[in-house]
Structures are given as structure tokens and as C-alpha cells.
Image (tube, rainbow, N blue to C red):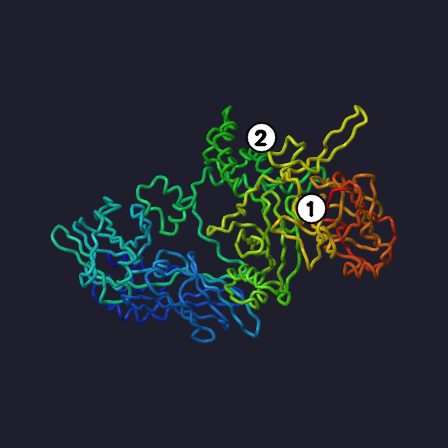
Amino acid sequence: MHLRERNVRCWFRLAPTSLITITALLGCGSSGLGSADPRAIEQDSILAELKTSAPALTLWVRTAPRISPDDANPSITIHGRTSRNLRSVVASSASGSLGQVVLASPRTFDLTLAGNQELRRVLSGQFVQLAIETADGGHASRYVGRFRVEAVVGGFHGSSRLWVNEEILPVYVAESLADPLRHRVSVRTSRDVSNAVASTIDGRSTWNGTAWNATADRRNAQTLRFDLTTDELIPTLGGDGQRLVFEAQGSREVFRKEAAVRVAVSNLELREAHAPFLADVCEQETRTCLKDAVDSSECGRFEEVRSCVEAREPSCPPMLESWIAECVLQQVEDFANDVDREKISALDALELCTHEGDLMGPMLDEICASAPDEPYCACLGQEDCFEAFAVDFVEPCATTVEPRFDCALGLTFRDIRDPPPTIVHTEERVVRIDDVTDGLLAAQILASAGPVYGITTLEEAFQSVDRHEVNLISFWEGTNGVPYTAIEYGAGDNSYGSVFAWGTTELRAIIGDSDLYDASAERRLGCRIPFGPRWSRCWSQDGCANGFRCEGVVLTYDEEPSETHAIAPGKCVESIESDGPEDGAACTSAQPCSLGAGFACSSAIASNDDGLCRPLWMFGGFAFPESMSIPASGTERYSVTVYGLATVAEEAVFTATLNYTNFTKLKLSLANPQDGTTSTFFDGPALGAAGVHALLGGVSGEFRVKLRVPVPGDEEVNGEWRLIVDTTSRGERVPRYDAYNIIYGDPTLTISSRYD
């Protein structure tokens, strides 16, 4: 009976992703009959491998590492091979770089982990991650692989009354505050026992067993557990001289069983490098268990529990948090696509989603329709249910969600590339390797691409990214008065990169698949750089705090009843007698203004060379409606309100994506607020096919444009500007092109201003 049960359990252990061969062989080699030699079993299984694949690459890793049980510097060596020639392999874990990798041949490698600290990291359950670069045919490809290293027990000899679990489970023991990691060996008995003890065969180490999970089944079975520290576990690895002995006193005899401790590789995975593995997060099941559990070790593996113990306790149910976050993103998008409404920030959208009944009511109904067991759904049908939902759940959730959306840099890299009025670009360019002439830029590029690909040289960085180029944007974040530099690149049609404190390699945010993450080790969604007190909206001086003045309020005059009133806000800027010694100083690309001091060259936005230094509050970008139609033949007008600048315009630029069938018909003009003075900045009929082609690269199709607008330098800058889209000209005959005939891609008017 016992033998049949053991064989059934071992058959299930042959699952493809868990201790595939070594666990099955070591755990099932003996059933207390004394017929198997554990050293023969090890010899049979030493070449067993795990296998996994990604596009164009297969990875094999041996399940049984080679163990060197040196007391002073114990180590394990893991052997792997690939289906393509290797250029490099770099190992790491969640705690940082890990071990030493040697390329043993063009397609094989050995990873050696040495010392108690490195072994502790992997035996705790942290994934070993491999940054793999292949180099067949001169073409480099990059991948990320990972696996776990686990301690296992096998090669059993002794009493059939004791069943030893093959897996040594890393657990979190909250009572051990200095080091909560313990390696748990579980032993099941078929009789009542006492005085359970585990020890090394030479008697150097001894552990007392603790009875737990006792059950009153027909065999009166119980489970014993033995918790070892890492320093106690490591000396038992790999040598039969340190075999473990388990003893328990039965009613008439002492039950005794021996076993050897080995190391096994499991959970092998492989991906392309542009889609890296996500960091461990606290799962709801583990979080719920920890709330009620007396013993934290019962709630999962060490790393699973640790991620919850160290995580900030959420103050709202995860499903509701997710719905509120989705509501915020939807509101931001809806406002951006509505020509009759101004864009709003994510914080503004969060205010709507957590205070507007028209949004919270449907949210409650839809959640409870799909998940009626959520705690706030129990009151449905009661009169005060919605109020309880809003006060007891939504309000705490708003506090929980706010740090994600209180991000002065925006939610995605797109918010930096096509910024709101609170962000001003001072430099924007595409960088190729020949353009890198200073050490700081080289270090920033390496810091951006290196962690994703595991690379160490600038040449490797540029070979890794799409089109072998990166985008650089230096910008001023106005609400905090802080400059930054963003390095962004494409990887497999996705956007990655970093945001640094300007002039340094100090990481401030991470760009991952276009989203912004904070720079902490947890890599939380949202940049976690809160909005500051500067550049807030104001309708009068009363709206600004002490030390700030209200600039750029848009006023209108009504003859009846003969009064002036504000139609658009200004912004609060610091109140100082002078904007600084650089204000008005001459500047060029070779002699720029000091971004660190809060100045930019007035001509920089239009890529002109000569200009004057202006304080950055005098610059701003203002968004037109997200999508503007180009008429087949006629004229359309679209408005944008400029506010918060000085008094008159100095330079202006229009940025957008144009998609049109015949650009020789298209004329784009801009009318200013004062007298409707019109400046044409794209004149397809005047340019003709040759001129349009020279400017855009074609006469029809889709083009991203950045066009300088020749604005009058002595007329009002704050107020309503109108984009005039004119296609009344017949234009020239061009090849037919089916287009959507729209202007989109965050159409923006960027303006620098000055005092008149």
C-alpha cells in the first residue's frame, strides 16, 4: 500500500516544468526497500536537461548543477547550452548581478554561484535571470532566460513509516526578524511519534522537529517539519558524507530514514529581450492569507510572502483599484478626443472618477454584475448603498491610486514627447553613435539600454535598438522647476528608456513599453514625481500663494455692461524683481542658455540659431483637438487657447502628423488672438509638387511635421489662436493615395514669448 502510494506521487512529479528529472529520480529511487544506490541514481540523471524556446533560439539547462561543498567558499556550477552561437551571457537576480559566467564553447556556458550570500539568494526562490546575446551570421539577437535553483531531498534509505517530501521549501518565518528565511523539510508519518530529530549523519548539526497539520485520518498520520537556516543548509549540499538522518520515536520502536540533499534547476523560461519578465508582486491570495494567518510560512514560498510583507498594505480592494485606474485613463482619452473640451491631467480625471456620481454609479453596477462577492456589493438594493460605496471604499481607493497618477512627467513617454503646458522642451534630437561626443551622454545611453540587454559598450547599445538610434529630449518640468533629460529608443516596436536628472546619470523614471515607472527597485507604475507648487493655474493674483505672481490670464472686454473678465487662466510664477542675469542675454546653439538656472533660448523651439535667453515660464506648448479633419475642398478652423505666457509672441512652431491625399492643395495658416493677423506656415499650392516633396519627402501620404510659424512679434500672445486648414486650391495632379485626410498625433502649438 505504501509503495503504491509513493509511486503515484512520483508519477505526478514528472510534470514538465518542476524538478523534471532529478526530483523524480532522487525522490522515487527507493521506497524503504534498500535496493537503490543514490550515487548510481545521480550518475544516471547528471545529464538530464530542461528545454525551452523563443523565436530562433532554444535553451537547455542541466537540472543537476555541479556542487563544490568547500566549507570556506561553497559553490554550484550550472551548465547550459543554446541552439545558436553565443556572444555573451550575463546572470542576475532581483537583488542585482549574480555569479560568474564562462563561455565554455561557442554554444555552451557555465554559471558559477559561489559563497553563502549568492547561494542564499537563489535558494530563497529568486529567479536566476540570464541576459543572452547570440551572434550567428554577424547578426546579434538578445534574449532573457530565467530559472530557479532549488534544494531537494532524495536517495532515501530506511523506515517506510517516514515519508520525506522531496522538495525543501523556502519559507518566510516572521518570528525570525533578523533573517526570516528558513528552508523547510517536511516529513510525514503513519504513526504517532515523539522526539522527532533530524541531523547530519556525522552528528555535527541537529534540528528538532515540530509537529503541525496533524490529522485524525485512519492511519493517524501527522506531519513534522524541520526548519534550517541557509548557513545550516549549505553544508549538507552534495556530499553523501553529510546525508541527513531523520529519527522519530514510535510507541515501540524508533523510525529512522536517511536522505541526501541535492540542488536542482526548475522553471526554465526564455523570451526575447524586448519583452522582459516582470518583477514579483504581492498576489491577492498571499495578501489575504497573511491577514488571517498565525504562521506566515503557511502562506507560500519565501519570495511570495516577502513581496507582500515588504509591500505597502493597499487601502482599497484590488478590483476597485483597477476599475478606478481604468476610469482615469478613459477620462483622459475622452477629454483629449473631444474638440469642445480642454485636455485634463490624470489627477483631474482621478478627481472626476472618485467624486462624480455619473461615473461611480455605473462603476458600482458593472463591478457587482461581474463580481458580486466584492465587499461593497453586499448592500445592493439598500437605500444607502451608493453612499457607503463612495465613502467607505472609493475615498480610500482615491488615496491609494493617487501616487500612480500624481506624476509631473505624465503617464507615458508620449506625454514627454508631446507635452502639456507644464513641460517645455529645450533640446530635441535623434542621436546616432557618431553624434555621441561626450562622456555624460554615453553614460546616459548605456544606463538606459544596458539593464534591458545586459550590454556594456556604446557600440552594443546602438546595435541593440531599432534603427540604431535613440531620441534625446532635454526639458523643464515647470511645476517643480526641475530640468530632466529623457533617453528613449525603440525595441521591437515598443518604447523603452530612462529619464535622468539633467546633467547627470541619476535615474528619475523608467520608460517601459511606453509607460512611465518610478526609479525604485520595485519599479511601480507611475513616475512618482508629484506635481509641485509652481505654474499652477490662476484667475487673478488671489489665486497664487505668497511669493508667486499670476501671469498670462486671458481677458476679454464686454461693451455691455462695459467690463473686463477672464476667459482663460494664467499661471503662478515666482515673484522676483528680475528673472535673473541671463534674462535677455544673446544665445546660440554654440552658446546656449543655462537650463539648470531655468532659461532657454527663444529661438530653440524653432531650430533657429540666434535668440535671446528667456525664463522658461515664458514658453509653452498648447494642444489642438486630437483629430482635425482636412476638408476635401474648403476651409476648416480649429482653436487653441494660449495662456500663462508673457505679453507678445517671439517664436512659434506647429507639430503634428498630417495624412492627406494631395499636399499641393493644402494651405495651413495661424490667426493670432489680437486682430486675427494670419501667418501662413505651409503653402502647398505655392510650393508645388517639387517644393512639397523637398519639404515633406512626398506629395501624399502620412508625415510627421514640425513647422515654424512666422508670428508677429508685437501682438498679444495669450488668447485664442485659430488654425486655418484651406484646401480650396485645385493643386497639382499627383498619384492617387487613399488617406484619412486628418491632422492628428497630438497637434501642438509651441510658443516662446517676451514682455512687450
Identify the residue shown where x is 43% and y is 68%.
Answer: 60
- Does label 1 or label 2 sit earlier along the sequence? 2
Q: What residue type is labelled 1?
A: Phe
Say which of 270 and 589 sits in front.
589
Quadrant hosting residue 35? bottom left
> Quick check: can you spot residue 309?
yes
- For disc 1, the marked residue is 619
Identify the residue shown where x is 59% and y is 31%.
Answer: 356
Which x, y percent locates residue 131?
A: 48, 64
Which x, y percent locates residue 510?
A: 54, 53
Identify the residue shown where x is 72% and y is 33%.
Answer: 567
Res. 123 mark: none
Q: Quadrant where the C terminus lies?
A: top right
Crowding around mark 1 (Cα neighbors within 10 Å: few <14, some 14 to 19, many 20+) is many
Crowding around mark 2 (Cα neighbors within 10 Å: few <14, some 14 to 19, many 20+) is some
Residue furthest to the bottom in view is 105
Q: Which amino acid does label 2 sit on?
A: Gly
Say which of 396 and 488 sits in front.
488
Which x, y percent locates residue 420?
A: 65, 45
Instruction: Answer left or right for 251 relative to 46.
Output: left
Residue 54 to residue 592: above or below: below
Q: Which element carries disc 1, helix, strand or loop?
A: strand
Residue 291 to residue 182: above or below: above
Instruction: Answer left or right for 197 relative to 518.
Output: left
Residue furthest to the right in view is 730
Q: Distance between the residues labelled 1 and 2?
A: 38 Å
Assess whether mark 2 and mark 1 are in contact (beta carbons under 8 angstroms). no
Q: Nearer the viewer, mark 1 or mark 2?
A: 1
- For disc 2, the marked residue is 357
Q: Which element carries disc 2, helix, strand or loop?
A: helix
